[in-house]
Amino acid sequence: MDASFGPFQLKRQDRQLLGPDGPVDLSARAFDLLVALLDHPGEIVSKDELFVAVWPGVVVEENTLQVHISALRKALPDGMIATVHGRGYRYAGPEPERFDPATQVGNPHRGPLIVVLPFANLGGDPDQQYFSDGITQDITDRLTRFQVLSVIAVDSALAGQGPVPDVERIRAATDANFVISGSVRRSDSRIRISVRLTDAATRAAVWAEQYDRPLADIYDVQDEVADMVAATISQKLEIELASRTLRMPPSSLKSYDLMLRGVFHYLEATRDSNDKAIDCFERALAEDPNNFEALGFLGVSKCQRYEIDFDLEAVQQGLELIERQIKMDQADARPFVGYSIYCAFAPDAVLTHAAEQSRAAVEHALRLNPNDYYAIAQRAAVAIYEGEIDVAREWLAKLKKLTSHALPWVVHYHALIAFHEGRYREALPGLANADFAWQSMYQIACYGHLGEPEQAQAVVARFAAQGRVLDFHAAAVREAYSDAVLQQQLIDGVRLGLQ
């Protein structure tokens, strides 16, 4: 929520502080410190709490905090930021007045809304579909980094049939201002990408381009497409482009190709596909140790072994990899999302502290990129664990507006909502992943509350037949709920199912 205090106005999603003379120049860390202090006006915020809020998952020295506090004090009137010696810091200025900006959940589009359609794979080889999907995703990700644009990735069903997208249908379904469509043709050493930007209101082509380049130039092509789309729209609508933060590209094309294959397998969300994803990411890093995106995906794939087999050692390994990625690129939202998802499952995690870390990490990710749908999905999950079911629904509704093809695990979040509202029968279909122990744990709890222990025990027997003997009760106790009632509901359900 945004806030005004004295002559200042803080705009969270725009990451901007406005003063009496216009925008105030603040570093990203100083801005985050101000947000953390304004969230607790008049209260002492300890140094440890500030480290968790501003540097989640990263070890920093205390003098780093002092440097950014000093910069924040220089930007604000004297006395607004008070030091409480030995304890922390306190916001001591005028009482902040909070208000809902136009960009709050339910009205997510802050600027022109762009729909990105899946790029067609013209190579004729279905085994290369992962590559065109990866190109589409990379261009989408680059566009979301322009804070003045709202970007939606949609599935091919919305586009209609045939090579020409049904722009009128897309506009009716999404209220899009612009549509991006294109195709990818790959050979052994070259790539041809055709891109078209269409005005959804007039159905006229605003801009079109074809890139025929060596495969090694793929990053330059993606950046050029994103820049041209954003610049063209900015000229048409007279909006100002925000500064962009680009990822460091892997130097090896083979590493990039392996990473795309790994992402494809990871999103399949099965036990076997997760193992294939880990293999791809490890090979990608062997080709290029500086491919930090592959490093992050390897981390979340390792962590996903906890969901598959409650593997605590794997989640520890995965979190270490994610933390390494965060240190390499602190401007990317995605690793903070991964940290938020899995930090609660670390072997040494204390549930209350882990829940705070999880929320801080995902909120930091949303400050970096408010349109990142991985972050939005995880924010919904955090709300569920905090017992804020209506808030979770709002975040999931926002996610649905941003992408029509849901992430594989979002169906589980809807099922969790049904579970905690006592709609156990309705929750079951969304938990039916036979490969994943985590979903099966909630299945068992549903059957327990429904008074069908034989169904719950059949789930356990299915794992046992694969040689997988799992402690579902211990896993239920480890779930990092802030709401003790919801935690007990899960524990009781598992107990009833397995008694």
Image (tube, helix red, strand yellow):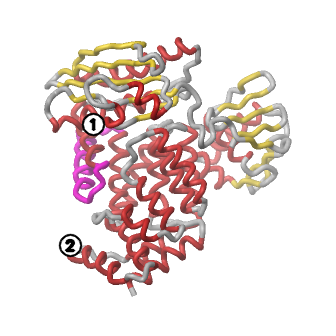
- Give the left or right position of residue 27, taking residue 285 as reference: right
Answer whether residue 161 is visible to the viewer in this image.
yes
Q: Position of residue 377 (x, y in %)?
A: 48, 49
Q: Position of residue 238 (x, y in %)?
A: 58, 14
Q: Residue at x 67, y 31 (%)?
A: 16
Is residue 469 found inside the magenta-colored segment of the image? no
Q: Secondary structure at mark 1?
A: loop
Q: Position of residue 135 (x, y in %)?
A: 31, 30
- Write down the quadrant of residue 453 in the picture: bottom left
Which amino acid, mark 2?
Answer: Gln
Is residue 271 found inside the magenta-colored segment of the image? yes
Count of labels in the image: 2
Foreground residue, 36 or 410?
410
Q: Which mark is residue 152?
A: none
Find the magenta span and give its range.
266-292
Foreground residue, 304 or 380?
380
Question: What is the distance, in whole Å, between disc 2 and disc 1 at their CAs?
Answer: 36 Å
- Give the left or right position of residue 329, taking residue 181 as reference: right
| Mark in the foreground, 2 or 1 | 2
Q: Dividing the image into 4 quarters, which one contains the C terminus?
A: bottom left
Q: Residue at x 47, y 44 (%)?
A: 400
Q: Residue at x 55, y 53 (%)?
A: 393
Q: Main secondary structure of the magenta part?
A: helix
Mark 2, residue position: 466
Task: Give the class, few, some or many, for how many residues have Cα within 10 Å of label 2's Cα (few <14, many ≥20).
Answer: few
Q: Position of residue 181 (x, y in %)?
A: 34, 24
| Residue 399 drawn above or below residue 479 | above
Q: Residue at x 35, y 37 (%)?
A: 155
- Write down the quadrant of residue 275 in the picture: bottom left
Mark 1, residue position: 288
